[in-house]
Amino acid sequence: MDHAEATARRLAAIKALGVGIAVDNFSTGYSSLAYLHELPVDCLKIDRRFTSAITTSPESKALVGTLVQLGKDLGLKTLAEGVETIGQMDYFRVEHVKEVQGFLFARPLEAEVLEAQLLAPTRPPGEKSAQVG
């Protein structure tokens, strides 16, 4: 962020193309509240370090709740990283966080494997494939 104005202009041009802008690992490292004011941000990504402890640490739960509310108040999407348990998923469901990612859903995949899974035909549970012949 040494060149915040130039960065903001570039991101605004990218956003004008229809690309969403997310602040990754929000509230850790170099991310700050200033980004939310200076940059054309669409989404806050809550770092997995906070997500991992929401069911065991009242402090983490309070911090995550604050970040979720901040996103709501600013009209931003909020995405929770590192969701690995049903308890964590339930917490975010109650908080109306609609976007989550983590090992509860899938491990990282090679692009070709993901594409094959997305393009594979799906069947309702219990439906058998048609027999030919």
Image (cartoon, rainbow, N blue to C red):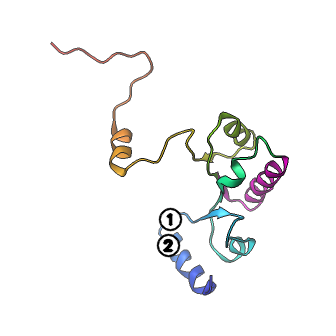
Q: From mark 2 to mark 1, how far is it between C-alphas?
A: 6 Å
Residue 52, x across and y down, in percent: 69, 47
The N terminus: image quadrant? bottom right
User: Where does the image place residue 29, in percent across and percent down from the top left?
Assistant: 68, 69
Of the image marks 2 and 1, the number of the one nearer the N terminus: 2
Residue 3 vertical placement versus 18 (above, below): below
Residue type, label 2: Ile
Query: Is the residue marked by circle 1 packed among few (<14), some (14-19), or many (20+) residues within 10 Å?
Result: few
Report the residue marked by disc 2. 14
On screen, residue 11 versus residue 37, left or right, reads left
Q: Let me know if residue 126 is in the magenta part.
A: no
Specify the farthest residue to the left.
133
In the image, which disc is placed on residue 19?
1
Q: Is residue 42 above or below residue 30?
A: above
Task: Name the main secondary structure of what is drawn in magenta.
Answer: helix
Name the residue at 74% across, 71% down: 33
Question: Viewer-proximal residue, 62 or 18?
Answer: 62
Tag 1: amino acid? Val
75 over 84 or under it: above or below: below
Q: Residue at x 64, y 62 (%)?
A: 25
Proximity of marks 2 and 1: CB atoms separated by less than 8 Å: yes
> In the depicted view, which residue is nearer to us: 112 or 94?
112
**Taking 55 as reference, is 22 left or right?**
left
Question: Which quarter of the rendered picture does the C terminus lie within?
Answer: top left
What span is in magenta? 58-79
Kind of element beneath mark 1: loop
| 118 horizontally vs 86: left or right | left
Which quadrant holds residue 85? top right
In this picture, residue 124 sits left or right of residue 75? left
Q: Position of residue 59 (x, y in %)?
A: 84, 51
